Image (cartoon, rainbow, N blue to C red):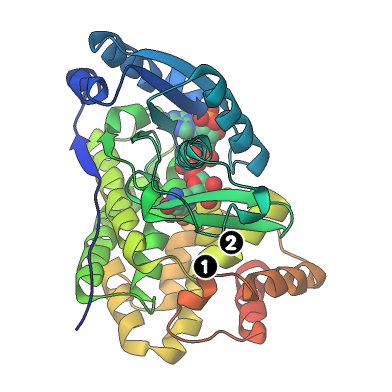
Amino acid sequence: MKFGFYMPVRLIQGNGCVREHGEVFGKMGKKAFIVTGKHSARANGALEDVLYALSEAQVEYEIFDEIMSNPTIEVVYRGAEKMKACGGDFVVGIGGGSPMDAAKAIALLYSQDIKEEDLFGGNYKDCLPPMVMIPTTAGTGSKVTQYAILTNDKKETKTSISSDLLFPSVSFLDPGYMRKMGRRTTIHTAIDALSHNVEGMISRRCTDLSDAMAKEGIRAFRDCAEALIQWDGETELSMEVREKLLYASTIGGMVIAHTGTTAVHSMGYELTYFHGTDHGRANGLLLAAFLKTAAGYMPEKVEEILHTMGVKTTEEAGKVLSRLLGPEPALTEEEIEKFAGISAGAKNIKNAPFELSKEEIVEIYRKSLNEE
Ligand code: NAP
Ligand code: FE
């Protein structure tokens, strides 16, 4: 078997790890450009820790805190303009996948002039400033991937900038930032991590190594599933569970860095684009029906995934997911047609080892969002 493995991100994990490593920031330059969302990085202490580490290392900084969920093309161009105006030797992304992806896109656009129509083209110069990521959700794995996913109004979906130049240099993993995260965000992001591990195993780019990692990620999720189902969201989830979910998301990121995501993500993007469904939730709603279709093409692989999830059938997997997600309004037939048309043309759906027909895509949407 021929394959490569490239994961050039230095990981530093542990409670308080940002404060303990001012020197990491100090080595990157004299001024940091911090990219984050509107609220959470202040509330969970991540921003304060970064500012402490920067002051220890005598590094100046500028903060751009305008990143919304599912960041737009407009906001990353605006962020890059601000960075050009105030300068910066490196970029620090703090938050969930949205600020981390935006930080990557801003680093890219700061380093070179790229017209909007060429943004997703993949033809970039190797002159990006170094990037440090500090995830505060345990889902996307953006801290270890070469992807930045942006809302693409022209295509009415979300599109990925993909380039090895977007790998961060260093990512700090502190589960403490997730301590007070609410039930919905915790579950949605955890299911995103599950989805990365599962889709990675049903990718034409998977290898024995990525499968071994994916199974480890699925097991980590499985170990947390019951605690998440039982959790009322009022009390604090144990730090052991938080740490395991962070682990599942880190592995999931490493997996998709090699395999890409596939149909579940392409189809989920439409739910997010048109209905504002949280990214991980969108994947979770579609995952069981996708597995059922995939079982027709690669029964043994799906069997292996189900076994690792600790369930026997795709229906049982669907039940676990719906206990986690709760009810979701149905889509209309017109919406299903439209969404299937868009996702059938997406780049990542082609990562699946089998070609899904438009009818199959329609059927997955229908089973996931239009049947009792
Ligand atoms: P997110 O959009 O980054 O954040 C969701 C919400 O959670 C925001 O309201 C955010 O608040 C809040 N939040 C963040 N950290 C929190 C914490 N510790 N406690 C409480 N609330 C917190 O969600 P995400 O699921 O992490 O990221 C989704 C994005 O990542 C999507 O755009 C998706 O397409 C992308 N993605 C990227 C990759 C990749 O490889 N690059 C892979 C999969 C998905 P604030 O807005 O105030 O920060
Ligand atoms: Fe994802």
Label 2 beta carbon within 8 A of ligand 2: yes
Where is residue 329 shown, x and y percent of the image?
70, 57
To which quarter of the image does residue 11 belong? top left
User: Mark 2 Cα within 10 Å, few/some/many (few <14, many 20+)?
Assistant: many
Residue 207 visible in the picture: yes
Q: Nearer the viewer, residue 167 or 312?
A: 167
Q: Tell whether 220 sits left or right of 184.
A: left
Identify residue for label 2.
268
Residue 141 visible in the picture: no
Name the residue at 29% across, 9% down: 55
Name the residue at 50% across, 52% down: 280
Can you name the residue that lies furthest to the right here? 334
Query: In the rendered view, would you say 318 is above or below 168?
Result: below
Q: Nearer the viewer, residue 15 or 237?
A: 15
Query: In the rendered view, would you say 307 is above or below 71?
Result: below
Q: Tell whether 53 sits left or right of 97.
A: left
Where is residue 265 shown, x and y percent of the image?
52, 63
Q: In what quadrant of the picture does the N terminus appear?
A: bottom left
Q: Nearer the viewer, residue 168 or 182?
A: 168
Identify residue for label 1.
264
At label 2, the amino acid type is: Gly
Are the two marked residues, 1 and 2, in contact with CB atoms closer than 8 angstroms? yes
